[in-house]
């Protein structure tokens, strides 16, 4: 068969319109059925609500860092403050929020529904017992519940009295892991790369719980970042406090030994006594110098903790959403009707395909 003898498609719009008119009854039936199905689907989807918070992390001030550096130089110390060597920055906040430790920490958060039917309940228990789902997911849910019931070895660990132990992020059960993934699916965090504005959004079937969890997630994220940023500085502060206790103890002992020796040999004129007294006095002065230096270093360590403390400006607080965030029912209706129309039209074209070749 040559290239010219191959059949070619001819788009005959009048003929296509005629075919559609002749099939209008079937077309209306298809579109009507699709409309009914779309209404059933639209009203079967549970309502969801979204609550959002916008944060702007503030940059560390160089002026404060410079003041501490100047203070450190006065006592012979070198502290390079202002050089930020953080390994965590706003772009990886979403990854931090998806960590198992972060998600498990949300299990015991107390929540209350807007209608008051749920009051002071753990967020994990609320997700397990008070979540609505479409009717077409019922078979999968029943199968999943049956599998969990058969897996007795995956039961939650308990203590000697039979009470369930708190979830261990290192060793989660299958049920706890699924619950953590469900919480992760309800939480989203996005960062504007141009402005570094952080947007935290929580989705839930209750508007009050969505707003409550948005505030809780934001507080926990701020705590996580604060602990990370100040971790080394707080360890340095604790170490300096320990050194201060030891230096103070040694200074008090040296001062006591010197005073006791002076009281015992106050009227003695022997050179050996004076030499011993001078040695004790020099040791006391040395211990006092060390003590004062440790005090100064402790103050610098405390200032370092404050300098490393991150600050966040809340641009938009969370509020209880008034309207749900579901896809509009009219959009679902239009989508189903268009899909049915397209499917019927494709079937008609397949049946009359020979009429559009020449």
Image (cartoon, grey):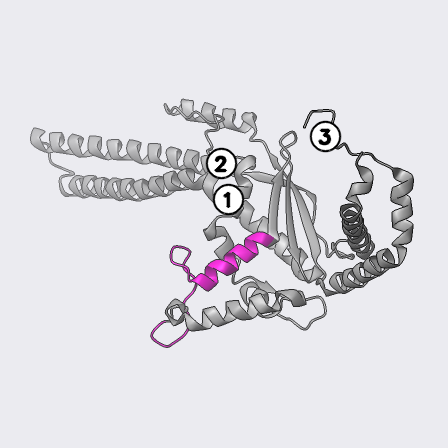
Q: Residue at x 39, y 67 (%)?
A: 154
Q: Is residue 105 visible?
A: no
> Which residue is at the front of the view, 164 or 34?
34
Residue under label 3, please give it: 6
Residue 146 relative to residue 30: left or right: left
The quarter of the image holding the C terminus is top right
Residues at circles 2 and 1 in contact by the CB criterion of under 8 Å:
yes
Classify mark 1: helix, strand or loop: helix
Q: Is residue 317 magenta?
A: no
Q: Quadrant of residue 42?
A: bottom right
Classify mark 3: helix, strand or loop: loop
**Mark 2 or mark 1: whose residue is earlier in sequence:** 2
Q: Residue at x 77, y 47 (%)?
A: 346
Frontmost of labels 3 and 2 is: 3
Q: CA distance from mark 3 to mark 2?
A: 64 Å
Residue 260 image point, x, y percent: 18, 44
Start and end of the magenta stretch? 159-185
> Which residue is at the front of the view, 166 or 257?
166
Q: Residues within 10 Å of mark 1 (few under 14, many from 20)?
A: some
Residue under label 1, please give it: 96
Frontmost of labels 1 and 3 is: 3
Q: Residue at x 52, y 39 (%)?
A: 309
Q: Quadrant of residue 119?
A: bottom right
* Residue at the limit of the structure toward the bottom, as seen here: 161
The quarter of the image holding the N terminus is top right
Residue 303 relative to residue 249: left or right: right
Residue under label 2, please give it: 88
Residue 263 image point, x, y percent: 18, 42
């Amino acid at each position: 068969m040559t290239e010219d003898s191959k059949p070619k498609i001819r788009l005959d719009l009048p003929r296509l319109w005629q075919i559609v008119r002749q099939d209008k009854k079937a077309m209306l039936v298809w579109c009507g059925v699709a409309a009914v199905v779309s209404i059933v689907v639209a009203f079967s989807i549970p309502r969801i609500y979204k609550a959002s918070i916008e944060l702007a992390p503030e940059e560390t001030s160089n002026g404060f860092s410079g003041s501490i550096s100047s203070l450190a130089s006065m006592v012979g110390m070198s502290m390079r403050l202002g050089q930020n060597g953080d390994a965590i920055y706003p772009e990886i906040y979403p990854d931090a929020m998806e960590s198992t430790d972060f998600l498990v920490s949300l299990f015991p958060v107390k929540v209350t529904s807007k209608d008051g039917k749920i009051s002071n309940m753990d967020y994990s228990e609320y997700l397990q017992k008070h979540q609505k789902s479409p009717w077409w997911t019922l078979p999968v849910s029943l199968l999943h519940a049956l599998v969990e019931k058969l897996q007795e070895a995956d039961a939650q660990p308990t203590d000697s009295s039979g009470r369930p132990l708190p979830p261990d992020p290192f060793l989660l059960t299958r049920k706890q892991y699924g619950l953590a993934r469900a919480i992760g699916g309800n939480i989203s965090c996005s960062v504007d790369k141009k402005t570094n504005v952080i947007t935290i959004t929580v989705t839930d079937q209750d508007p009050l719980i969505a707003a409550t969890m948005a505030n809780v997630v934001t507080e926990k994220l701020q705590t996580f970042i604060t602990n990370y940023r100040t971790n080394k500085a707080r360890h340095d502060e604790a170490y300096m406090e320990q050194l201060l206790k030891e230096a103070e103890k040694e200074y008090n002992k040296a001062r006591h030994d010197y005073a006791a020796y002076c009281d015992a040999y106050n009227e003695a004129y022997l050179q050996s006594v004076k030499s011993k007294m001078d040695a004790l006095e020099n040791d006391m002065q040395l211990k006092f110098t060390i003590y004062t230096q440790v005090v100064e270093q402790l103050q610098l360590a405390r200032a370092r903790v404050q300098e490393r403390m991150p600050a966040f400006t809340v641009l938009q607080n969370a509020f209880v959403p008034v309207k749900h965030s579901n896809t509009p029912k009219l959009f679902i209706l239009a989508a189903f009707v268009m899909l049915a129309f397209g499917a019927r039209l494709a079937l008609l074209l397949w049946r009359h395909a020979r009429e559009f070749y020449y």
